[in-house]
Amino acid sequence: MILQYHMLRGNDFPPVRANPSDAGLDLRWTPAEPAETVLQIKPGDTALVPTGCKFGVPHGYMLEIKNKSGIAYKRQLLVGACVVDSGYDGEVFVNLHNTGRETQYLQPGDKVAQAVVVPVVHARFMASEDPDLYEWYPITISDRGDGALGSTGK
């Protein structure tokens, strides 16, 4: 599969895989203004971090923006819900949250997340008047029922 991308502010920080077998393409902070040299994210704060990238995502796929494990562990910077749908043609931003106790500082080009191509199943959804969703047509092999939040553990 070939997935096109375009760099909005030059080609300084293109999305790349660190290793050929990596699942994700590394995304980096690409400031909207050249004068921006530091991005500060205080403990508990969230920043919408521009990547300078836009992607042509084909129908039947999405880009899921995921944590970089080292950044999440070492800097406590976690990615919020980020899905890039097919058809979206704007810049990709990363919703980055500082869960740690120290202010984190980013410099232009610092890795912030990774983009993973994920297939999407386009199902039709149908409302049911019957709350017993599995009785009418057995679409599961589980008898879990409405157990949630650790109900299968001890």
Image (tube, rainbow, N blue to C red):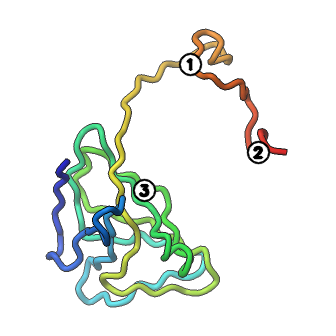
Q: Is residue 154 left or right of residue 106?
A: right
Q: Residue furthest right?
A: 154
Q: Is residue 60 above or below residue 46?
A: above
Find residue 36 and report its image quarter. Answer: bottom left
Which residue: 33% across, 69% down?
A: 26
- Give left or right: position of 83 versus 3: right
Q: Earlier in the sequence, mark 1 or mark 3?
A: 3
**Badge number at residue 139:** 1
Is tag 1's residue or tag 2's residue first in the polypeptide sequence? 1
Q: Residue 84 or 20: which is nearer the viewer? A: 20
Please, what is the three-letter code of the amino acid marked with disc 2?
A: Gly
Q: Secondary structure at mark 1?
A: loop
Disc 1 to disc 3, C-alpha distance: 29 Å
Between the C-alphas of marks 3 and 2, the distance is 26 Å
Residue 45 seen in render: no
Which amino acid type corresponds to the residue marked 3 in the rendered image? Cys
Residue 150 lies left or right of residue 48; in this view the side is right
- The percent position of residue 18, horizontal first and vertical second, equals 31, 72
Q: Residues within 10 Å of mark 2 (few under 14, many from 20)?
A: few
- Callout 1 amino acid: Ile
Task: Return the residue at label 3.
Answer: 82
Name the spot of residue 5 as percent of width and height, x first. Answer: 18, 60
Tell me the crowding category of disc 1: few under 14, some 14 to 19, or many 20 or more residues within 10 angstroms, Cα based.
few
123 over 12 or under it: above or below? above
Q: Which residue is mark 2?
A: 150
- The residue under the point 23% across, 77% down is 13
Q: Give the Cα distance between marks 1 and 2.
A: 23 Å
In the image as oriented, which residue stretches furthest toward the front?
21
Dot 1 and dot 3 residues touching (CB under 8 Å):
no
Up the image or down, 149 lies above or below 25; here it is: above
Q: Which one is earlier in the sequence, the residue at label 3 or at label 2?
A: 3
At horizontal 22% and vertical 56% (from top left) the residue drawn is 55
